[in-house]
Image (spheres, rainbow, N blue to C red):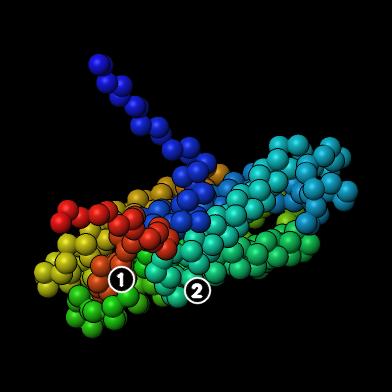
């Protein structure tokens, strides 16, 4: 008799996606957390596209795009392409909010539940809501540079929660164990502070220069060369701190993971610095401005990854599917021979 081999069926992708949220494993939850990081990086890029294409008022109303429609409709004072770009940026915000909600549900369903992950996950949808409100203020104030700058800075702040969740979901809950000397950890904290200053200075440069979101929007009254020089100095401080940390990690034989993180940050700093000077001497072309904004948030993420790599909290629990996919079902007892 010829035996019949049954082909193992591939799980439905929708079922797999549902299980990743409702019956998450440690691995699937970390993937969801990474999606949160990626989504918030993308929204910075889309926001940059809004600014450089002068689409900030493409949807002149909020929360509706126009006075009587949630979606773009023909408007005598706004080009269709500008309305589409601004509306697309708003839609990405809703996607990021949806991802944040799914991450939060998965954090509640994770077994064993970890309270710190639940807190980090809850912060994501709450922060996106705050960002949407600030976006409304940006529109209602007709792109006031302070409101626009705050709107951008919410994304790096939200990335703090996203990156922390992503990294912590791959670790255990043991008390933090330093892997380097205290003074190196202090340099890592100083690097984060300096990176935050660079981001703030960058928003002032953008709010002073030609890419403020709309041709008629207000700018800061600063001299563009002065604010650019301040931004450049703060960037050099970040570069110097990173170089010192790199030398310290190699001279003290720090763990390989920490050395990899500082190498990644150094590569990003060199690329970002070169891009910044090129865009300055070429008159800040739009494409390079968007790439510079992308580089800024990638550096921010890399700086946090480096900081977290300077300590250890042990391996994560429940790495197997049986341990982390939900309450275990009662096992069937098989009769044993006498």
Task: From the viewer's perspective, tell me whether residue 225 is left or right of residue 133.
Answer: left
Question: Helix or strand or loop: what does disc 2 sit on?
Answer: helix
Extreme-top residue of the structure: 1
Instruction: Report which quarter residue 141 is drawn in.
Output: bottom right
Picture coordinates of residue 18 (x, y %)?
52, 49
Q: Residue at 46%, 52% (x, y): give it.
A: 20
Instruction: Report which quarter residue 325 is drawn in.
Output: bottom left
Picture coordinates of residue 116 (x, y %)?
43, 75
Quadrant in the picture for the N terminus = top left
Assess disc 2: are there few (<14), some (14-19) or many (≥20) residues with their C-alpha within 10 Å of its C-alpha.
some
Instruction: Report which quarter residue 317 is drawn in.
Output: bottom left
Q: Residue at 38%, 72% (x, y): give it.
A: 192
Identify the mark nearer the N-term, 2 or 1: 2
Picture coordinates of residue 7 (x, y %)?
35, 27
Q: Residue at 16%, 67% (x, y): give it.
A: 255
Quadrant in the picture for the C terminus = bottom left
Task: From the viewer's perspective, tell me whether residue 233 is left or right of residue 186.
Answer: right
Q: In whole angstroms, how far apart are the C-alphas of marks 2 and 1?
A: 16 Å
Work out whether residue 75 can be spotted. Answer: yes
Q: Is 132 in front, or is 296?
A: 132
Q: Which residue is mark 1?
A: 172
Work out whether residue 155 can be spotted. Answer: no
Question: Helix or strand or loop: what does disc 1 sit on?
Answer: loop
Q: Residue at 58%, 48% (x, y): give it.
A: 46
Q: Which residue is mark 2?
A: 119
Extreme-bottom residue of the structure: 182
């Amino acid at each position: 008799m010829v035996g019949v081999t049954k082909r193992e069926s591939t799980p439905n992708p929708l079922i797999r996606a549902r299980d990743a949220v409702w019956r998450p494993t440690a691995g699937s939850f970390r993937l969801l957390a990474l999606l949160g990081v990626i989504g918030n990086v993308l929204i910075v890029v889309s926001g940059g596209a809004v600014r450089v294409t002068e689409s900030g008022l493409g949807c002149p109303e909020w929360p509706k795009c126009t006075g009587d429609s949630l979606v773009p409709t023909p408007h005598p004072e706004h080009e269709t392409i500008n309305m589409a770009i601004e509306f697309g940026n708003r839609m990405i915000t809703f996607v990021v909010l949806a991802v944040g909600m799914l991450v939060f549900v998965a954090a509640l369903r994770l077994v064993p539940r970890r309270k710190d992950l639940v807190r980090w996950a809850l912060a994501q949808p709450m922060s996106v809501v705050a960002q949407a409100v600030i976006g409304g203020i940006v529109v209602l104030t007709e792109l006031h540079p302070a409101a626009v700058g705050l709107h951008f800075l919410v994304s790096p702040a939200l990335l703090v929660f996203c990156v922390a969740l992503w990294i912590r979901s791959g670790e255990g809950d043991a008390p933090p164990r330093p892997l380097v000397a205290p003074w190196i950890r202090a340099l890592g904290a100083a690097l984060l502070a300096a990176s935050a200053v660079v981001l703030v200075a960058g928003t002032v440069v953008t709010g002073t220069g030609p890419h403020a979101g709309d041709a008629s929007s207000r700018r800061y009254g600063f001299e563009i060369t002065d604010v650019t020089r301040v931004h450049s100095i703060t960037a050099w401080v970040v570069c110097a701190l990173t170089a010192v940390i790199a030398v310290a990690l190699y001279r003290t034989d720090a763990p390989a993971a920490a050395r990899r993180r500082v190498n990644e940050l150094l590569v990003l700093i060199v690329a970002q610095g070169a891009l910044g000077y090129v865009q300055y001497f070429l008159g800040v072309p739009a494409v390079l401005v968007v790439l510079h904004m992308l580089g800024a948030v990638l550096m921010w993420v890399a700086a946090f990854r480096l900081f977290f790599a300077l300590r250890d909290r042990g391996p994560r629990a429940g790495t197997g599917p049986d341990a982390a996919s939900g309450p275990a079902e009662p096992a069937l007892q098989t009769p044993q021979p006498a």
